[in-house]
Image (cartoon, grey):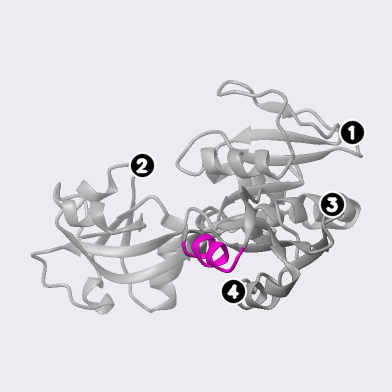
């Protein structure tokens, strides 16, 4: 990897995998538009000439950030824990939530963690698994596998597995039951410790941009006109974030414009309520970014 200019921030994101597209989407919505990039491209430019994107495997992102190849990165906490990388966790992006669990065959007699003493455990996360069993004083043999972890017990490769699950459906399909949780993961923005000192302002700018997208999720902007004498009723209907914003309407002194940010799930009901209260010229807009 070639060195980069000292004033350039490099953001490492997954080049593939289940969280790659959602991460690219949140970056786009944050306003940090990616000018170029693709499946075969390692580095891409963004709308900000001081920020570039580095596409790498999710499992490699923690160490790329820890070593300073990238200043910041976005990946799952499970990847950070597995690598044991020395990074700073900046922001939970609240996506890619999953649990790393111990699962055993439905027909097995294993009922508690201690029952697995001396048994073989198949996993794609040998680091986390080894640490977990060591902390609980249970001696096991770790079998590292790559993919199709659920099949390991049925093939005789292992007695149990440690694998990621979000809904548990795949485990049930493979006749496995969860014995115990090992680790809870979600997708985070992480940073290199030195970069946080050298590029504090720019990294804060990126973090705020991403956080503004998260804050806007599930929110709508509701606008309407209402007669002044009906304003109290509208206020009682629309609490908003800090109460609705009321503005003068230049063309009619008897009207005021009312704006409020409301939860998307309430829009269907609210439109009917404000309409009955006398509101007109009602407009609903998506909120792309929101900074409280």
Magenta highlight on residue 170: no
Q: Residue 69, located in which quarter of the rendered image?
A: top right
Callout 3–callout 4 Cβ contact below 8 Å: no
- Tag 3's secondary structure? loop
- The residue indicated by pointer 2 is 146
Above or below for 234 versus 56: below
- Identify which residue, 110 or 97, lies in the foreground: 97
Sooner in the amino-acid sequence: mark 4 or mark 2: 2
Side of 217 where 96 appears, left or right: left
Magenta span: predominant SS is helix
Side of 63 where 255 appears, left or right: right
Magenta highlight on residue 273: yes
Above or below for 238 versus 23: below
- CA–CA distance in space, label 2 to label 1: 37 Å
- The residue indicated by pointer 4 is 237
The numbered mark at residue 251 is 3
Sooner in the amino-acid sequence: mark 2 or mark 3: 2
Q: Residues within 10 Å of mark 1 (few under 14, many from 20)?
A: few
Instruction: Specify start and end residues of the magenta stretch as a single range.
Output: 269-278
């Amino acid at each position: 990897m070639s060195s980069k200019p000292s004033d350039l921030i490099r953001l490492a994101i997954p080049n593939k995998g289940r969280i790659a597209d959602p991460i690219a989407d949140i970056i786009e919505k944050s306003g940090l538009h990616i000018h170029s990039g693709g499946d075969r491209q390692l580095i891409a430019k963004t709308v900000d000439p001081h920020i570039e994107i580095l596409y790498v495997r999710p499992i490699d992102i923690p160490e790329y950030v820890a070593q300073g190849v990238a200043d910041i990165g976005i990946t799952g906490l499970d990847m950070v824990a597995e690598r044991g990388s020395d990074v700073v966790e900046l922001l939970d992006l609240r996506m890619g939530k999953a649990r790393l669990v111990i699962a055993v065959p439905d027909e097995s007699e294993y009922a508690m963690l201690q029952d697995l003493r001396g048994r073989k455990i198949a996993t794609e996360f040998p680091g986390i698994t080894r640490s977990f069993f060591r902390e609980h004083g249970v001696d096991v043999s770790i079998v590292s596998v790559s993919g199709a972890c659920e099949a390991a017990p049925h093939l005789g490769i292992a007695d149990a597995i440690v694998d990621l699950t979000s809904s548990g459906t795949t485990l049930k399909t493979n006749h496995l039951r969860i014995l115990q949780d090992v680790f809870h993961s979600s997708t985070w923005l992480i940073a290199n410790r030195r970069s946080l000192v050298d590029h504090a302002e720019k990294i804060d700018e990126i973090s705020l941009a991403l956080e503004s997208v998260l804050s806007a999720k599930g929110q709508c902007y509701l606008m309407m006109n209402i007669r002044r004498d009906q304003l109290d009723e509208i206020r009682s209907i629309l609490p908003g974030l800090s109460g609705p914003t009321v503005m003068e309407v230049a063309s009619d002194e008897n009207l005021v414009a009312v704006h409020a940010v409301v939860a998307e799930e309430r829009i269907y009901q609210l439109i009917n309520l404000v309409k009955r209260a006398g509101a007109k010229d009602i407009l609903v807009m998506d909120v792309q970014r929101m900074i409280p």
